[in-house]
Image: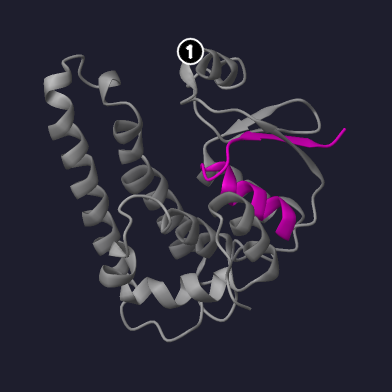
Amino acid sequence: MSYTLYGQRGFGSTCVEAALELHGIAYDFEIADPLDGAGGLARVRSINPVGQVPALILPNDDVMTESAAILIWLGDLDGQYRWAPRPDAPERAEYLRWMVFMSCSFYSTLAITDGPGRFHPDPATHKVLLHQALERRKQMWRVIDTAFKGVAAPYLLGEKMTLLDVYVAMMSHWSPRGGWFLDHCSNLAGAVRATEKHPVIREVWRRNFDLEVEA
């Protein structure tokens, strides 16, 4: 039995698609959109009670959720660490720090953006909630961009692309859009550009974001 990835075009499943393909792992993709009305949400909840994608069904039928956890697990899976620092590598601590930071501090704000009614039932409050979620995301981008100020290597952790680069590159295509990321995150932009030139990433981005990246 192969892996099965539940997700939707352009959602958090995008980075898991990329990780599976970078590792040469065969998988089936099942479309599951938690924002597609009650039916879509019910389908996702039948796999992940939280009602979120990605969800990865392992060959033993166990279910993995949470994009950062899936990426970290896949990066360590075969023991070759082609796309992750080894546990004893000097950059391992930074890798784990920023993986979890992006998941908890940045990604979590999208739960508000995708459904402000889950956080306050009065629609009159939703405009403020959406605004504050967006401002929080911008603040978190500035935090990580400042942390990588002066990094001269092509990728965030050095000469080697890791799944952290993939994670950051994926999120750079989410809100705030309109060139905000390129204008305000110059320290991260180079690593994003380098990551998106990888042939596997180019193909995954093409089908998820309609993005054609020059080699």
Name the residue at 58% across, 48% down: 14
Q: Which scheme is used to colour this image of the protein?
A: one colour
- Please indicate whether residue 190 sits to the left or right of residue 56 in the image: left
Q: Position of residue 81 (x, y in %)?
A: 69, 63
| Residue at (84% x, 37% y) in the render | 2
Q: Is residue 157 visible?
A: no
| Residue 160 position within the rendered picture, expressed as x and y whole percent measured from the top left | 60, 76
Q: Is residue 123 left or right of residue 83?
A: left
Look at the image and tell me in which quarter the C terminus lies: bottom right
Point 21% across, 55% down: residue: 139
Residue holding disc 1: 38
Number of marks in the rendered image:
1
- The stretch in magenta equals 1-22
Q: Can residue 43 be found in the magenta stretch?
A: no
| Quarter of the view holding residue 57 | top right
Q: Farthest right residue?
A: 1
Q: Is residue 209 left or right of residue 184?
A: right
The picture places residue 200, in percent across and down from the top left corner, at 69, 63
Task: Name the image quarter holding the N terminus.
Answer: top right
Residue 28 vs 149, above or below: the answer is: above
Kind of residue at disc 1: Ala
- Where residue 161 sits, quadrant-wise, is bottom right
Q: Residues within 10 Å of mark 1 (few under 14, many from 20)?
A: few
Question: Which residue is at a point 57% across and 60% down the rendered structure image?
Answer: 163
Q: Is residue 136 visible?
A: yes
Q: Give the percent coordinates (x, y) of residue 103.
A: 41, 45
- Give whichever of 61, 52 is nearer the camera: 52
- Toward the viewer: 154 or 121? 121
Q: Is residue 6 magenta?
A: yes
